[in-house]
Amino acid sequence: MKTVYKDIRSAVDSGKKLLAVLIDPDKFSIEKIPDFITKVNASVATHIFVGGSTVEDDATHVLVEVIKTHTSLPLVLFPGDVTQITPKADALLFLSLISGRNPEYLIGKHVESVSKLRGLGLEVIPTGYLLIENGKETAVQRVTATKPMSREHIQSIVDTAKAGELLGMKLIYLEAGSGAIQPITTKIISSVKADLNMPLIVGGGIRTKKQLESAYNAGADIVVIGTAFEQDESFFNNVTIS
């Protein structure tokens, strides 16, 4: 039964905040996974996202297979390319980079993936993906050959997110990028959330408990933590979500 999106929607509708730990296959060795996932299981994390902008073929499949033996948390693919699709995961964020205008990442990669997805039984969740400037160039920007949206043009960000909803997306993901200097501002988060009737994901550049709480208070339903937890596995020790 495909329940990942249903459970996210139910949690959001009841006012519960969710937290995903992002694991990039390029940054994790298989040997590191058991200990790392033990810490994730003991934390307040509710989901595990797996993916990266550039990942070697089959690396995601192997990593996901190992992770699944160490956790019961929902494992969701956050793919940078078709090669990162594996049936071992629970769900796939079917990302459309609606902040950019490169047709490959608006629809091209999606068409390419259909033959691989057909028959897998993988839960596919249509997700509008918006890259927002953070103070430095990100891997997403380089790989997709698209420019991030200006932090100053908030109405444009809001309108783009709303367009994603009207197109039928089930989630909107505001992304500052891995290792971002500046996270998504609370003004952007609150403005986007106020105009949406769907769950909002926020990620990139969140390194402190204060930044995490600020994102939630501004309206983020799911916050994604990657670099912060990679660099400091005690990050969640004093974090609570409700």
Image (cartoon, rainbow, N blue to C red):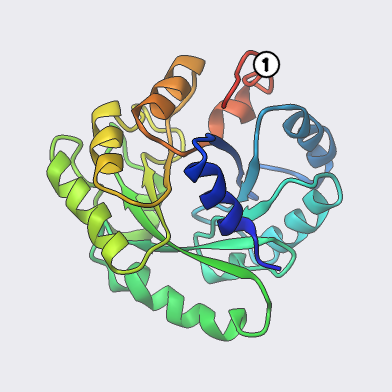
- Say above or below: 138 vs 111: above
Q: Residue at x 40, y 41 (%)?
A: 177
Name which residue lies at 58% across and 57% down: 6
Specify the quadrant of the image occupied by residue 86.
Answer: bottom right
Please, what secondary structure does the residue beneath circle 1 have? Answer: loop
Tally of numbered tags: 1
Q: In the image shown, does 3 or 67 lie closer to the viewer?
A: 3
Please give left or right for residue 39 compared with residue 236 in the image: right
Residue at 49%, 22% in the rendered image: 207
Q: Is residue 1 left or right of residue 38?
A: left
Residue displayed at 18% across by 41% down: 150
* Quarter-of-image position of residue 21: top right
Q: Which residue is mark 1?
A: 237
Placement of the C terminus among the 4 image quadrants: top right
Q: Position of residue 32 (x, y in %)?
A: 79, 38
Residue 213's place in the image compared with 48, above or below, is above
Residues 6 and 41: in front is 6
In the image, residue 89 lies at what x, y percent? Answer: 70, 61
Dot 1 amino acid type = Asn
Taking depth in this image into account, of 34 and 191 the one nearest to the observer is 191
Residue 225 visible somewhere in the drawing: no
- 80 to the left or right of 183: right
* Mark 1 residue crowding within 10 angstroms, few (<14) / some (14–19) / many (20+): few
Q: Position of residue 200 (x, y in %)?
A: 40, 45
Q: Is residue 185 above or below residue 124?
A: above
Residue closest to the eye, 54 or 63: 63
Residue 66 appears at what percent x and percent y? 82, 52
The answer to whether any part of residue 58 appears in the image is yes
Image quarter where the N terminus lies is: bottom right
